[in-house]
Structure formats: structure tokens, C-alpha cells
Image (cartoon, rainbow, N blue to C red):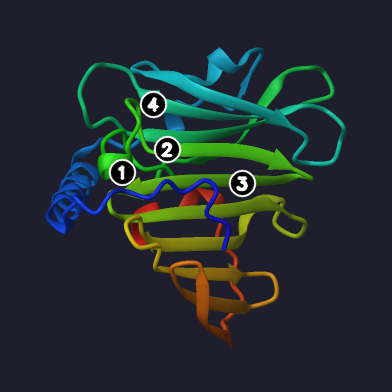
Amino acid sequence: MNWKNVGLFTSGIVISATISSMFTGIVNAQSVQLLNPSLVPTQGKTVQDFVPKGWKIQDRVEGDINSDRKPDTVLTLIEAGTQSDRARAIVVLVKQANGKLQRFAVANKLLLCSSCAGVLSSPDGANSTIKIISGVIIVSQLSGSREAREATHRFWIDKSSKRLILIGKDILDYDRANGDSTLTSINYLTGQQIVEKSQGQKVVSTKKSTIQKSKQFIDTVNIEAD
């Protein structure tokens, strides 16, 4: 287990703060207004053309997701305004031969809202990162407090449906005070699941199992269901 990026809290942190932050996140997640995908245009000249009224670009990442050697774009959108609980969404754009951009996918349930990550929220949402590596879109989100969770979802274009599907998921639940953790890794292409439990820095058990292979499109994945 690599803990270089995991800062341990001091023993003074109490579990009640974790429970409070988790409860607040659940309430906020239920109250935010999700992005309506129909409000996102199907084509445009610039990324700004795909930002509906009342929303703004929080982040953008470029990379080739369809192997045509043209830079595609993944946008993170967030509701405009100053309210603490704002919805967030992912919009995937592909560059066409004529240089214009085409809407490829809208995922309005994949990202935690601006206040749904508890103590580990940043000012505008969960501690989230998006990368494009070898055509795979990798979305990582950190949430919680002493009891923390790092959720990583991986997507690529399915050849048969020509849509972005979930090919793998890692859910790491860990105690920031003592380092105890449970890592659940699922490969939806092979149908394999591995659950690894650790105490501190030591792995104490590893369980492998077979799950049913399934296709989950990026626009149907709900972070609250993990």
C-alpha cells in the first residue's frame, strides 16, 4: 500500500466529526440540482460553447480518447454561484476532422457536489483529479475526514457501443489516524474483484472473487452508489 499521498491525522481527531461530515454530505447530495444533459449542445467551436447558463468550467483536461491523434477534452463543470452545495458534472468532448468539438458524453452523477466530500472537500468540491492516459479517462475523488475514501473510476470507449464504459474501479477506505484500510479493486472487463485489508502498513488479507461482467456507461455511474 502506497501511503506517500496520505497524510495521517493526529490522535486528537474524533470519529464524531467524521459522522457529522458524512451526514452533511448525504444531505447536500440529495439537495443539489443535477445538470440536465439536454442543456449541453451537441456541437460547438470552443469548450465554452458547451457550458449551459448557470454553470462554469471548473477544470479541463485534454488527451486522445478515441485514438484519432486529435486532442479531445474532458470538462469539469460546476454550478455558478456562492452557495456551499453546488452540483458538478463531467462533459466529454471529441475533436472532429473539421476542428469543431462534438459532445460525446455527459456524466452528471459521477462527481461529488461542492460540499459532499466532508472535511476533505476543497473550496469548490471534492479533492478530485481527472487524467487521460492511453485513451483511458481516470477520475479520482477523495472524501471523508478521519474515516476517508478515495474512489477511482476508469473509462474507455467500448468498440461495440461506441460509448464510454466503466472498465475498472478502486475504492480505498482507510482510517487516517491508524492507517487501517480496505481496498476493493474491480475489473469489469475480466470480471475479477480483489479485496485487500491492511492494518497500518501491513496487508493482513487478500480475497479474490469473480463478479458478473457488465457494461456501465459513464453517464449512468453514480458516485453515491459506491
Alpha-carbon distance for marks 1 and 4? 15 Å
Q: Tell me which numbered mark, 2 or 1, is placed earlier along the sequence.
A: 1
Residue type, mark 2 in image: Asn
Kindly identify which residue carries mark 2. Answer: 127
Q: Nearer the viewer, mark 2 or mark 3?
A: 2
Q: Select label 2 or label 4 by which is in front.
A: 2
From the top left corner, tell me how far across and down residue 215 is, in percent: 60, 65
Q: Are marks 2 and 1 in contact (CB under 8 Å)?
A: yes
Please report the residue visible at 56 percent of the width from the left and 69 percent of the height from the top: 185
Q: Residue furthest front?
A: 11
SS state under label 1: loop
In this figure, which residue is indicated by the disc labeled 4? 78
Question: What amino acid is found at the position of numbered circle 3 in the picture?
Answer: Ile
Q: Nearer the viewer, residue 151 or 6?
A: 6
The quadrant in which residue 1 appears is bottom right
Q: Is mark 1 in CB contact (under 8 Å) with mark 4?
A: no
- Above/below status of 217 relative to 25: below
The residue where tag 1 is placed is 117
Distance of label 2 from label 1 (alpha carbons): 8 Å
Question: Which amino acid type is shown beneath numbered disc 1?
Answer: Ala
Q: Are marks 2 and 3 in contact (CB under 8 Å)?
A: no
Structural crowding at the residue carrying mark 4, measured as other residues with C-alpha within 10 Å and reported as few (<14), some (14–19) or many (≥20):
many
Say whether disc 3 or disc 4 marks the residue closer to the N-terminus. Answer: 4
Q: Amino acid at mark 4?
A: Ile
The answer, for residue 5, to whether it is visible in the render is yes
Q: Position of residue 184 (x, y in %)?
A: 50, 70
Residue 191 marker: none
Mark 1 or 3, closer to the camera: 1
The first of marks 1 and 3 along the sequence is: 1
Q: Quadrant of the C terminus?
A: bottom left
Name the residue tied to disc 3.
Answer: 138
